[in-house]
Structures are given as C-alpha cells and as structure tokens.
Image (cartoon, rainbow, N blue to C red):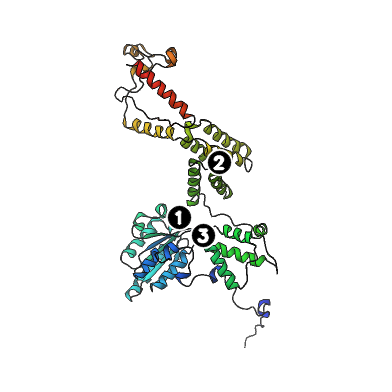
Amino acid sequence: MSTRSKRAPSLFEAAGLEHDAPRPLADRLRPTKLSEVVGQDHLLGPDGALTRMLETRSLGSLIFWGPPGTGKTTVARLLSEATALHFEQLSAVFSGVADLKKVFEAARARRETGQGTLLFIDEVHRFNRAQQDSFLPVMEDGTVVLVGATTENPSFELNAALLSRARVLVFKPLDADAIELLLSRAEEIESRKLPLDADARASLVRMADGDGRAALTLAEEVWRAARAGETFDAAQLQEIVQRRAPIYDKSQDGHYNLISALHKSVRGSDPDAALYYLCRMLDAGEDPLYLARRVVRMAVEDIGLADPQALVICNAAKDAYDFLGSPEGELAIAQAVIYIATAPKSNAAYKAFGAAMQVAKTAGSLLPPKHILNAPTKLMKEEDYGAGYDYDHDAPDAFSGQDYFPEALGRQQFYDPPERGFERDIRKRLEYWAKLRKERNS
C-alpha cells in the first residue's frame, strides 16, 4: 500500500475546470474542408488553380508563397485529405538533413504499400542550398509530393532546380470582406458579438493587415478585455490591443515592395500616394536616413534638370534629418517627397548618362582631339598638342563651336531634354548652340 499522502485538488479541479486548456480561436476556426478557406478564390474558386488540379485527381509539387495567416498550412493539410495522401509536416526552422532522411525513408516504405505522401515544409526558404537539393530525387521519382510554404520571394530564396520541379501558387493577403467573414464565424462559434462599434470593427480589420490568424487573435483580446455591456470605440480598441505592428521586414520583400511603391508614386506625380508609402515605412521602423538617400536618388533619376532645385532640396532634407533626428527631422523628408512628387519630371539626364556609359565602354582608349589637350612640354607642342584650340570665352556668345569628341568616334548625342520645366530653357540653349556650331563649321 502506498504511503504517499493524497494530493489536494487544485483550484481548477475544485471548480470543475479540470479539462484541457481551451484551444485558441484561430485553431477552433481552422477550416475542415477546402470550401471553408476564405480569401483565396483565385486558387480554390470554381476556376481556381487548385480546384482544377483536384478535378484531375493529380497533384504535383507546389510552392505556396504568401504572407502569414493566409491559409498556406491549412490548404496543404486539406489537399492531402482530398487526394488521400499521407500528410507529413516539417518546419525548416527546426529540421535538418537527418530529419529529411527519416521522412524520405518512411515515404519510400509507405509508397511500397501504395500510399503516397504529401510532405509539407513550412518556411522552406530557410533550408540551405544542399538541403533544398536533397528534395530533387524524391520529387522526381514520386516518393513525395512536396508542398513548401514561404513568406519570401521564391525567385530569390529557392534554388532554380527546385523551382523548375514545382509550381508556385501565390496566396493573397485577406481582404476586408474575408476578414469580416472570419469575424462573423468567430461570433457564431462564441455565440456573442464583438463589443465594438462600427468604426472600431473597421479599425480591427485594418489592424489585421490581411492576416486571418491575427484578426482572430485580436478578436480574442477584445473579448477578454470587455466588461459586461461594454462597447469599445476605435480609440479604446487601440488602447486595449496596443495596436499590432505592421508586417514589415526591413531586409525582405516588404521593404523592397514599399520603397518601389514610394518611388513609382513620386515618378507618377502622386504626392498623396507617395506620402502614404513614406509613412508606412516610417511607421514600420524603417531607417529615415535610408529613405532620405532614396529620395535623393529619385531627384536625380526622375526629376533631373527639369527642376535643378529638386536635388538641392532633397539633400537639404537629408541634412535636416541628420541634424534634427526623429521625429522632427522626418517632416523634412516628407517635405522633400512632396516637392519631388509635384516637380516636373525628366529622365533625360539619367538616360544620357546610361547612353554615354555604353559608348565609353565600347569605344576603347580613343584619344581626345589634340586641339583640346594641354601641351606642358616642348615635345608635346611640337606634336601639335593644343594647336588650334579656341578659348570659348574669347568667341562671340562665349561659344567656339569646336568639336570635342575623338575624331574616330565622331559627334554623339546623349542628352535630349524634353519641353518640360527648366529643361525647356536648356533645350533652347542647345538648339541655339547647334545652330551656331553648324554656321561656324560650315
């Protein structure tokens, strides 16, 4: 007979709450069939790519590319059920070559009994090149149907050999309607409404940032915080949930997508869109000096000499931020963004530089014409270095009209200013000088 004393019941057991901890709302609402997946109609709708595959009962290897909380893992699991494949899941974060070998061996054994395997790899981009290469033979011989999930651009993160054997399917961030549908399902399963007014509910949808899991987590936080009969407005909601940080990785796709959107908004002369993307990046924690450098680049690439002040103002904004720091200095960057977005646009200098660089690379080591070379020695003077050079300031209109290109190359034209902004005046000067050059060289 045991001599151990009997354990006293815990408070939870005494209260009759000895069951397992409640499952998170996102887990309870996980779809049990593909038709319940929201926000991915382009894949699972009547004409969706996955719908067509399932109709033929043939499933090839796939790469699911999309942001978190869009259903990649759920769809992979449901695909295995729909195709009667054994579902095996690994995370590239926690798995290595030894884990892969065990999974491949088990899949081979399963295959001999007539059972196929769907191998789902979460964060597949985290595997190195050698690990990614290990999938190739088992994909080719049909040992596994690989479904890899990644939040990063497969073009940059996955081997070309792996990509050539798999089809990439893009999962989209959930739109407002899809998030609303999830919230409605949550209210149904909870048998209670979210204690939010209309503005607060719309704010919660925006905070989710296209992530269904995040939307349900936020909903749980709201229900936990609400007292009986209490309804939150948008300001109270932000206080309660402390606002979820935007999905943004300064070294990955989010970073490049938003800076591209900012640059193209400036180029498209849309100051409002440009300010929106600038603020998105600042709010997400982007380095303001990085943004200031990119704004300087925009000034020289897309405004150029159509407004020579653009570069001056953008450099001044960079210096102002350097001097003031955050958050005061951010206003200077915003002001520069507005200036260049509303400035006349020209890429003439940008194109001229590129064209001149191409000619410079292919022209070899052609010497400039002798008349524009200095003659610091007697020998060079005897070789006619500098002979016949006309000092432009001594010529009428301070323009001699001489040719400055190497004789073997001949005259070239790289810079072609448009009839916009300050470059309209530059064009008039160039046309006038071209006329003078023709007269004085005829």
Q: Quadrant of the N terminus?
A: bottom right
Numbered circle sitting on residue 175: 3
Numbered circle sitting on residue 289: 2
Q: Are marks 2 and 3 in contact (CB under 8 Å)?
A: no
Q: Are marks 1 and 3 in contact (CB under 8 Å)?
A: no
Q: Is residue 300 above or below residue 285?
A: above
Q: Position of residue 6 (x, y in %)?
A: 66, 83
Q: Sort mark 1 into few (<14), some (14-19) or many (20+) by Cα contacts within 10 Å.
A: some
| Residue farthest bottom in this picture | 1
Q: Are marks 1 and 2 in contact (CB under 8 Å)?
A: no
What residue appears at the point 65 percent right and 66 percent down from the top-left corner?
A: 195
Q: Secondary structure at mark 3?
A: loop
- The first of marks 2 and 3 along the sequence is 3
Towards the viewer: 220 or 112: 220
What residue appears at the point 55 percent right and 41 percent down from the top-left corner?
A: 289
- The first of marks 1 and 3 along the sequence is 1
